[in-house]
Image: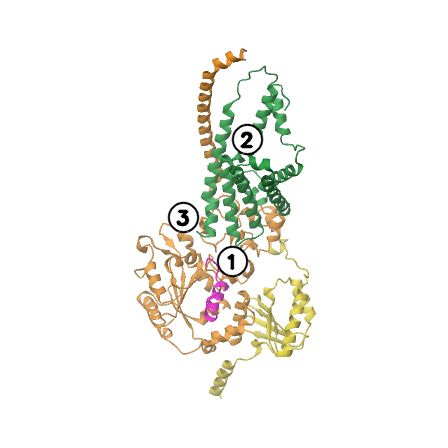
Amino acid sequence: MTPEENNETTETLGQNLIGNGVSRRTFLKFCSTVASAMALPPTAATAMAETLSKATRQSVIWLSFQECTGCTESITRSHKPTLESLIFDFVSLDYHHTLQAASGDAAEHAREEAQKAHKGKYILIVDGAIPVKDDGVYSTIAGITNLQMLKDVAADAAAIVSVGSCAAFGGLPKADPNPTGAVAVSDIIKDKPIINIPGCPPIPVVMTGVLAHVLTFGIPELDSHGRPVAFFGESIHDRCYRRPFYDRGLFAKAFDDEGARKGWCLFEVGCKGPTTHNACATVKWNNGTSFPIQSGHGCIGCSEPDFWDAGSFYKALSTGSMNPGEWATDALLAGAAVGVASGILNKASKSKAEKNHKPVTLEDMGGKNE
Amino acid sequence: MNEVELLNWARGPGLAYATVIMVFGLTIRVIEILSLGRPKELAKVRSSGTGDGLKLVVKRSLPEPRNWRFITASYIFHIGLLVVIFFFIPHTQFFRDVFGVFWGGWPNYIIDFFTVLSIAAMMYTLVQRRIDPSRRILTTVSDYVAWLVTFIPFVTGYMAFHRLGPDYTLMLALHILSVELLMIALPLTKLTHAVTFAISRYYTGSSMGRRGIKA
Amino acid sequence: MNLIDIPVKTLDKPTGMANAVMNELSDHLKRLADDGETNIVDLMSLPMTEADINELADMLGVGEVKATISSIGTSSIRETAYRGIWWVTHYGDDEQVLSELIEITQVPDILITHMDEIRHSAQAMATVN
């Protein structure tokens, strides 16, 4: 990330890796793992490795807006070098204001340099939502609004990767009542290919896998929310190891009951797995250790748009999110009042009609009414 | 609006509006009917009519030995409807959330069985309505609407449960929306009989009893 | 309570997948023999239980080559009793299985030293001597 590295270099990634002590076998192993995780044909790993090694290191500019740094933590946090962290050897991360050593003017200068040097070729990674209310004054970096910076940097980017639910869908900043008018990257930038990697945070291997795919085979197949199908094609529910309990109707009713201890389905305690698309159930977290449902908590649906506004995390998906019971009580009282009023009106018109007809009817009948 | 926003709307404001319309409408209907009272008996009153009223509530709920195919289909669909609404586990969660009571759900395969049976029975009754001349004359547009808004939730629910259709989230949203349509239609069509059937049967039974007529 | 105490067990009995994979491998091996076409089967992409994988390993048997690579975790490469069918397992730095592949080839790519690295080493040796 030094200015020297920003300059166009003819050194290929393969040569660069040897220089950095990353063996080709490690490299190939990374590609095998990515290919497996992305369900690419297994033979693609070798092609991926060859393509990557012949390429020059891809310039990447990473912009962080309204975010919590959780996404950066997710991709970098690891006390040992893991295979996932190798992605940082494949790209030239030219600007990332949390990770870079430079600060102030020097940092912004590095960004402008990279923008100029790799015009039209760099990949823009964004984490965090962008506030647009009041011309975007609610979040600025070096006196530049996030809105303006995104527009400037996106203009010369080859592609954009929105990392995390905030950049992809607006996330927490956009949650009701959205005081800063936060929106997703795709709400502002319309003329560039955008890949969404949502999650709060996203799974590290999903981020590295998608980046590796972009570097080698280009933009992967995306779903209607711009998410790579390889990782977001199936719901948590469909791949959940507790699914058989759902089908048999065995549910935990509380977090400390017998069902919870027996590892039954968490639908009734609010699991949003059925409507959530992500790779947690297969790839898992913390180097494949576990994922929320495995540790006894329902899925909160963090990789879906507007998940903060989808009602309680602890109420079943089949319940209403706005307390329909309370509305029903009010409607019942209102209905009763209107019903009684209309009943009185009906009675009045009925008795009036009866009054008008009575003498005639009785006389005709010649009998007596009880 | 994408499928996620649709689902969020259906589970939130949509459900609230539909609940208000249904409860408000049905309450007015029931109170209006009850406040109408009964006309003055011009003949001598033979009995209080209570027993005859209650008898007819039960009797009219039992099958009559006429057109057994149509009656069987109607029974299957009504029982299926009640079973699916009140005993599918995700539905019981809804009622637990609203009323605070949980009466236990039934395994999915039983619900699935009743759903398929009900869909078939409903389709049979529709075909009968079209084929049988007297039924066809008696059926109004409102009756077809009532049939449709009852039928759609079955189909969307079945599709959502079996992951049919383009996307589960979308199917779930459509299912909830179709139920909301049914809730709105409840006070506006003959579907009101879901809450008034007992009142009308009791009324008929008791007024016949008061006049000494065998119902 | 430990995770192990939770009596949720994934189904662990043979499902017949091993036979299906054997059929596929047989087809691939024939193509390698006839046209020299190499192939890789990704076991992690298949719905195989632990028992299926063990069954497949038994069916394939053990050959005479066994190699271990140490690079951010180890990789184990074993030739099976069917020559030309290799069982490749990549482990992460914490012994977690990253990928499990069956390669149908003369020698898996990962064992071959890449020419870039040979050139780099040749240079390094020349400088030392």
| SS type, badge 1 | loop
Picture mark count: 3
Q: Residue furthest front?
A: B133
* Chain letter, green: B
Q: Was residue A10 drawn as part of the magenta stretch in this picture?
A: no
Asked if A274 appears above or below A339 in the picture, the reply is below
At label 1, counting other C-alpha atoms closer than 10 Å, the crowd grade (few under 14, some 14-19, many 20 or more) is: many
- Give me the residue at 66% from left, 32% from top: B64
Which residue corresponds to mark 2?
Answer: B196
Which residue corresponds to mark 1?
Answer: A278
Question: What number is the disc on residue C88?
Answer: none
At label 3, counting other C-alpha atoms closer than 10 Å, the crowd grade (few under 14, some 14-19, many 20 or more) is: few
- The magenta region covers A205-225
Which residue corresponds to mark 3?
Answer: A176
* Chain letter, orange: A
Tags 2 and 1 both on a single chain: no
Residue C29 in the image, given as x and y percentages of width and height = 65, 75
| SS type, badge 2 | helix
* Chain letter, yellow: C
Residue A75 appearing in the image: yes
Taking depth in this image into account, of B120 and A240 the one nearest to the observer is B120
Q: Chain of mark 2?
A: B
Residue B190 in the image, given as x and y percentages of width and height = 53, 34
